[in-house]
Image (cartoon, helix red, strand yellow):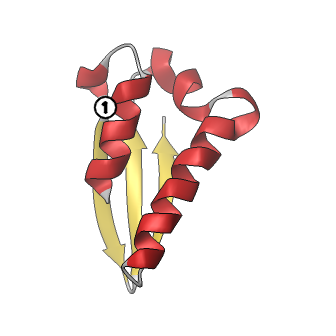
Amino acid sequence: MKELVETIAKALVDDPSQVRATEELEEETSVIKLTVAKEDMGRIIGKEGRTAKAIRTLLNAVSTKDNKKAILKIVE
């Protein structure tokens, strides 16, 4: 799942080399932390958080298919 988030983020930002996604397991939940360059933060979040919400929706769909739960955290 972290590969999915990383691929989407790299397609959206100006500097794909700064995109990092890490995955931590907490009980039955997967927490994916996404880090991008400060200049690209607005592109990842989007107007009124629409882009971030769309990424979370895709992540939710994939994790539900695998009978898991996933949370996306965007780290500054």
Above or below, 69 relative to 33? below
How many numbered circles are shown? Answer: 1
Q: 68 left or right of 47? A: left
Q: Is residue 3 left or right of residue 62?
A: left
Q: Residue at x 76, y 34 (%)?
A: 48
- The quadrant holding residue 29 is bottom left
> Quadrant location of the N terminus?
bottom left
At 31% across and 31% down in the image, what residue appears? Answer: 19
Q: For residue 52, what is the image quadrant?
A: top right
Percent position (x, y) of residue 21? 30, 46
Q: Amino acid at mark 1?
A: Val
Q: Secondary structure at mark 1?
A: loop
Q: Which residue is mark 1?
A: 19
Q: Position of residue 34 (x, y in %)?
A: 40, 44
Q: Residues within 10 Å of mark 1 (few under 14, many from 20)?
A: some
Q: In the image, 18: left or right of 8?
A: left
Place of residue 10 in the rendered image (x, y in percent of width and height, measured from the top left):
33, 29
Q: Residue at x 55, y 23 (%)?
A: 43
